[in-house]
Amino acid sequence: MLKRDKNGFLQILMELGFDTEQFEAFEEERDDSPAFVIRLKESPIAFWTRNSINSYSEYDCAYILFGPTYSSSGYFPDQRWSEDINDVYNEFREWLTRHVKPYLEELSVPDLWSQVEDQQDVFGMLLTENEDFSMFTNEERVQLGDAVRIFRYRIQEVFEPTQNQLKQIDYKLNYLLEAANKLNKFDWKSVLLSTLIGIATTMSLDTNSGRTLFYIAKQVFTETIKLLH
């Protein structure tokens, strides 16, 4: 494929606001014709444009659809070549909008079901045979404050939340500390769990990141939780 035609795809990516570093491009033969392939890195999603073996000015294209089976579209135009690269560019825009964008959005959505196991792990840390319904002492509230400050620092260190996210996280952590002044130890543990879930949601953490958050919480709060037993 001519370089000027290749460059047009890059311009479209930038025009539509995609991160060009998320894509890779290469040339290979597909279905007996030379093809220029654009692939979303670390995914099955790809778009390719072929030239006829006789001319750089004859094109068709196909792509992988975002769907349960990641099947391949048919070639466009069907059973003939287009003589206008803009026909291919229009298909490329359609592919980016209808398939690449939804694929990337799906990757960014947290899998809350997969976090159930991690939440149950935290439940196990919180639950005991002999629950304590007493109120926190002043000394215990000081220790809780230290644990919350450490937890906040670890969140910043590991996840690098935005200022807006950090503001929401601070609100949740402050509420957690205030709850220790009003609630008994048994009821406070429920607030701790809901706070962890809320923080994960605030940062839109994916499955692995959500698991990391709960692991950090378990590390930081394990000693503190002993106060509740």
Image (spheres, helix red, strand yellow):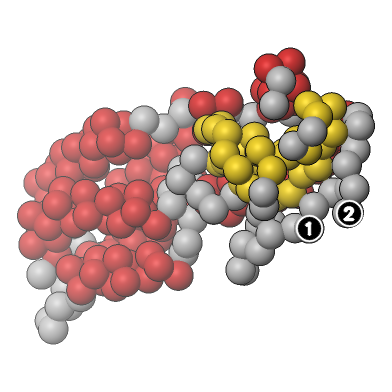
- Which residue is depicted at the point 47% across and 26% down? 163
Quadrant the C terminus occupies: bottom left
Mark 2 surroundings within 10 Å by alpha-carbon count, few (fewer than 14), some (14 through 19), many (20 or more): few
Disc marking residue 16: none
Q: Which picture quadrant has residue 78?
A: bottom right
- Which residue is depicted at the point 14% across and 65% down? 228
- Which residue is depicted at the point 69% across and 59% down? 72
Image spot of residue 167 (x, y percent): 46, 32
199 vs 142, nearest the viewer: 199
51 vs 128, nearest the viewer: 51
31 vs 164, nearest the viewer: 31
Label 2 sits on residue = 78
The reply to whether the C-beta atoms of the residues labelled 1 and 2 are less than 8 Å apart is yes
Q: CA distance from mark 1 to mark 2?
A: 7 Å
Disc marking residue 74: 1
The answer to whether residue 85 is above or below residue 178 is above
Quick one: SS at disc 2? Answer: loop
